[in-house]
Amino acid sequence: MDFDTVVMKFGGSSVADPPKIQHVARRLVEAKQRGLRVVGTVSAMGKTTDGLIDLAHQVSPTPNAREFDMLLSTGERIACALVAMAIHDLGQEAISLTGSQAGILTDGAHMKAKIREIRGDRVKDALDEDKIVLVAGFQGFSRDTMDVTTLGRGGTDATAVALAAALGAACEIYSDVPGVFTADPRIVPNARKLHTISYEEMLEMSASGAKVLMLRSVELARNHGVRIHARSTFSDEEGTWVQEGASMEQPIVSAVTHSENDVVFTLSDIPDRPGVAALIFDVVGSAHVNVDTIIQNVVHGNAEMSFSVPTEDVPATNGALESTRAELGDFTIEENHDLGKVSLIGAGMRSHPGVAAKMFRTLADNGINLQMISTSPIKISCMIARSEIPNAVRELHAAFELENEPIHEA
Amino acid sequence: MDFDTVVMKFGGSSVADPPKIQHVARRLVEAKQRGLRVVGTVSAMGKTTDGLIDLAHQVSPTPNAREFDMLLSTGERIACALVAMAIHDLGQEAISLTGSQAGILTDGAHMKAKIREIRGDRVKDALDEDKIVLVAGFQGFSRDTMDVTTLGRGGTDATAVALAAALGAACEIYSDVPGVFTADPRIVPNARKLHTISYEEMLEMSASGAKVLMLRSVELARNHGVRIHARSTFSDEEGTWVQEGASMEQPIVSAVTHSENDVVFTLSDIPDRPGVAALIFDVVGSAHVNVDTIIQNVVHGNAEMSFSVPTEDVPATNGALESTRAELGDFTIEENHDLGKVSLIGAGMRSHPGVAAKMFRTLADNGINLQMISTSPIKISCMIARSEIPNAVRELHAAFELENEPIHEA
């Protein structure tokens, strides 16, 4: 490591109570004692954010977005101030900064603001004064409106990556799992922790169900060349490095991921004419629904179309679909909540076409029926019965021998 | 009323839960609908501040003062954001501002900052845009350190008065009591709500135990000529106006107050030489103890001295006294926790010397022994057995006929 500065991010479960806050303080102080300049960024304690959201909904059926951000941003400030207090007790100087004080400038889109720029002067000044700097995660400040903004889901990871980019620092993301695994260890006991993984594979993993890192922070890291070290809050063991792919050593298959959070919509009796799919996905996209797999079929001159969306987007999807009836007539909408998705990810896959066939055969040999398939150059996803997910993950992990060190391309 | 702007302050118990927050929102909207420009300032919900203090002490035995302010300031921000949301639901525009956004500039003394100046531009701009403005109470911003500060006890009342001064606004302080009474109505059922009271009387009342307004905000109001209307959160009835004394109509006695929060220290065998009292009260004052009544006596060449302090200042007082032993030798310290204080307040008292005699006689006739007496031009206080306090308050209220409209000076 040739960084002299490190940004260390701790999630809500890592600061859920006073003893855990003291533990995080010790981790930050240990890094300082190893000679590093240390920036910590933390999420709100435990379920604090959920509590604030609940409070807002008790007060207002449709909370004003600006005020929602004013409300939610307090959670991270509380956690940061408490960590700073605990660091003082360990004999080190510390200062907590709000997103605004840390110079995290965003656009004005409340509840889903995008970071535009980091003016890290105050952070740098405090580091120069030999202080450990705590930055409240998940929040920034819009100079257009002079208002507090929040960054939406995965916001604190994004804060950490953006700070690391601005400070030229290493980025360590701590959580209750010790790194990125070849599959979920709760399903596959001999899943192997990866030493490194490329940005593009990690993006596909996050998009297909891996929870250890949020898609958004991985994208931000890739765009700014920030190396992320995903590791455990509770141990010193090395975790997984997410970084630019090492071109000579790309494993064919790196990991199996799964998701049980997809609902499949099937639309039938829709007119089969140009522009219908465009209209549907335009309307669904405008409702901020993340559509995943899409397949289409034409039967007797009427199209049938299926696509999957995350469970939380189901109401928005229905609303969007209903709004197309004037133009598309009386088509039928079916929802299937009994499916799940299993995916294989591997940067080496693009030059090894046999991977898809082997995947389908493995599933077939285990009596698992494929409902939908989607692929990218480095990923193959199959929608299958949700009840078959654990079995499918185990069988694929075994078939591709992921418990062993990877097979590399020639 | 010739004000076009009103600052309305609601305490923590007025915003303790979502229905109460909605109620406060309705009160603010009603004022707006009467054609006023409306600024609301609220304290943290219910016991939120106590919860945050408790959390800080669980994390750190001696929480860093700067971080303590960062932590505590979140409580009022949460309450303000929620009130603003509730106002939006009533069809009015509202915006919540932190102390810093509202331009409340303080010195850098964390946890007890003093307001230096209010730069109300952003508040005025928002009022010009026809919005109801919510300002987070109890907090400000130090330009010396660029840090969030809190104002200490009674901070939100001080925020309201200072805003009213800066905006040339009326100041309404809402609480769960409907105004200032001639005595505590829980002790004296026929206590009468005062229509007006002068700043100087209110200052003496607050200093001698009346809880409806904090001493500090009354001082600030007097210094800036802000009229305070102390009234009920839960009814529309008029409360009590605190204002410049009407010179022609000063009642001899306006109210009876009491306090059960005093501890009397008695020091004996202290050397009787010049400078001893100065030394003692210098040291005690430096420990930020609010000394009230002081009496001194010389017996056989050694002085005996008694003084009362608020209960919460007892440890600080003991620490300060012990530090004088090198100079003052082996004097004895006794604490008496069984006393309370009953006071008569009245601006007309200074020209009516008979008041003290009548007070002492009334107490004596009821078998109540006086332990200490202290007076100001408009107040007489007696320390008596704490168990006698309710009885003393009732008898004095009756003797001075405070249930009737006041007797005025000639």
Image (cartoon, coloured by chain):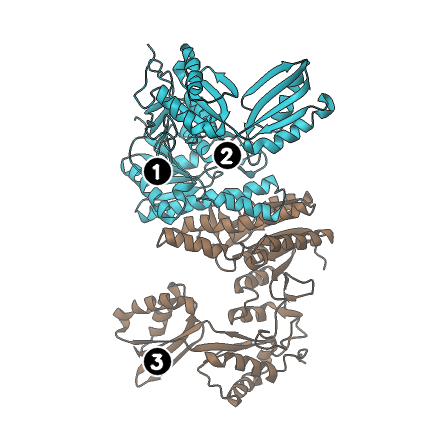
Chain colours: A brown, B cyan
Q: In which quarter of the view is residue A225 placed?
A: bottom right
Is A200 placed left or right of A408 in the picture? left
Q: Total marks drawn?
A: 3
Q: Are marks 2 and 1 on the same chain?
A: yes
Instruction: Give the class, few, some or many, for how many residues have Cα within 10 Å of label 2's Cα (few <14, many ≥20).
Output: some
Q: Give amino acid for label 3.
A: Glu
Q: Give amino acid for label 1.
A: Thr
Q: Residue at x 27, y 70 (%)?
A: A325
Q: CA distance from mark 2 to mark 1?
A: 20 Å
Q: Are marks 2 and 3 on the same chain?
A: no
Instruction: Give the class, few, some or many, for how many residues have Cα within 10 Å of label 1's Cα (few <14, many ≥20).
Output: many
Q: In which quarter of the view is residue B97 placed?
A: top left
Tell me where residue A62 appears, x and y as whole percent.
36, 54
Q: In which quarter of the view is residue B360 placed?
A: top left
Q: Residue at x 37, y 82 (%)?
A: A297
| Residue on which disc 2 sits | B153
Return the chain for callout 2.
Answer: B
| Residue on which disc 1 sits | B233
Q: CA distance from mark 2 to mark 3?
A: 67 Å
Return the chain for callout 1.
Answer: B
- In the figure, A323 relative to A101: above or below? below
**Which numbered disc covers residue A304?**
3
Residue A165 showing in the rendered view: no
Helix, strand or loop at mark 2: loop
Residue B82 showing in the rendered view: yes
User: In the current view of this chain or complex, which residue is farthest to the bottom?
Assistant: A365
